[in-house]
Amino acid sequence: MNNAGIINACLNFLFFCEPFLFLAALIGLVITPERLEKIRTFIIFSSFTNLILALIQGVINRTGNPDYVKGVFIEGGAGHVLGASVSLTFGIYYFVAAQNRPLWFRGGVVLATLIHMNMADAKQALLVFLFAGVLLLFLKLKDIVQAIKYLSLAGIFGSIFYWATQNIPALDGFNTWMRPEIYGPQGEATLLKTATFRLVPTFYHSPLNSWLGLGPGHTVGRLGGWMLDKYADLLAPLGSTIHPASAAVWRAVGMSWLGDQSSMFSPLFGWAAIWGDLGWLGLISFLCIWFVVWHKLCFDDVSKFLMLTPLVFGLIFTQMEEPGYMIYLVAIIGLRWLERQNLKQSLAQKQS
């Protein structure tokens, strides 16, 4: 309907669905305790490699540019955010799963991941994890007493965090967002963040566009926002197509004085991309896949918390389309599920 190239559809499918294909393959393995231990060891070794390499980069970084603290994601455009996101994910998993390690060591690993995040100036990653934690708490609420308790704790933590951003130089980067005047219905941050939802409908040519979108790669995702243009010499011969809606949103970014301040204000983000490219039906189908993963594989708070993080990232930028982060995330969720299945099998064997 939108004359999108087949290569657009293939790449768009891979960006959003590759993690689920990998997760399906992982949980479909016949796992013995020995094989599970090999998978766990490989993931932990890889995670420590990313963390240690990032800390070394932070120490020897002579340019002072935190974007060069990327861990294993060297030369990646958003490598500093990817590396920090992977580290924070690993820190949470390791603290809970590595029960055979002393508490001080597991706590030290978590602290090291926070140091990595701060060195990389990936403050949006920390904000995402905090917000995902708040969402998980609200999803677990069962009565008004719990709600009051959690809201009180959140208020206390928020006050401490705000004080820290105002008094600790290492955290002053968070003040980029703490400007009340840029929010509100007519605030510059609000207008820029919602630009996609105002501009994309102006290109609709059929009532079906609302349900099916403008076509894969035709609006503000990783594909339409960057890759189709950057890799045109490779993709154009394969029939890739570009839509003027992408350029219209980029013009809105260029015209805003907040456009280069932080990705937090960017109108090019995951949920907007799914809605713009694939419409309401695409958005619903994507949510259905996540719903299945949540109910079938996320059996504990750790898995549920980690699954919420990319959904929150989808409100900020295009991290839901970054294989380096998403494949790692679903590997951790799959590993948790495999560990549980292995434990259930062991208990069943003992009982028999």
Image (spheres, grey):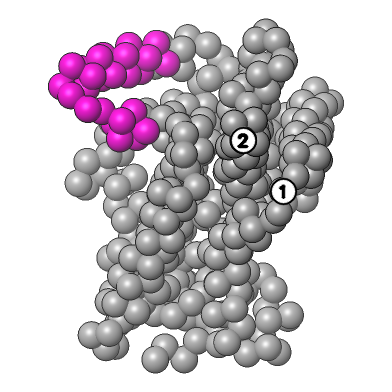
Label 1 crowd (10 A; few <14 / some 14-19 / many >=20): some
Q: Position of residue 195 (x, y in %)?
A: 33, 60
Identify the residue at image location x=52%, y=26%. 173
- In this rendered view, identify the residue nearer to me: 254 or 110: 110
Element type where label 2 sits in the image = loop
Residue 106 place in picture, x, y as percent: 67, 16
Mark sitting on residue 111: none
Residue denoted by label 2: 352
Q: Which residue corresponds to the image point at 47% horizontal and 91% vertical from the top-left?
A: 3
Whether 67 is among the magenta residues is no
Horizontal side, residue 16 vs residue 271: left or right = right
In this picture, residue 136 sits left or right of residue 76: left
Q: Nearer the viewer, residue 227 or 102?
A: 102
Dot 2 crowding, Cα within 10 Å, few <14, some 14–19, many 20+: few
Q: Which residue is mark 1?
A: 31
Q: Which span of residues is magenta-colored?
A: 135-161
Residue at disc 1, secondary structure: loop
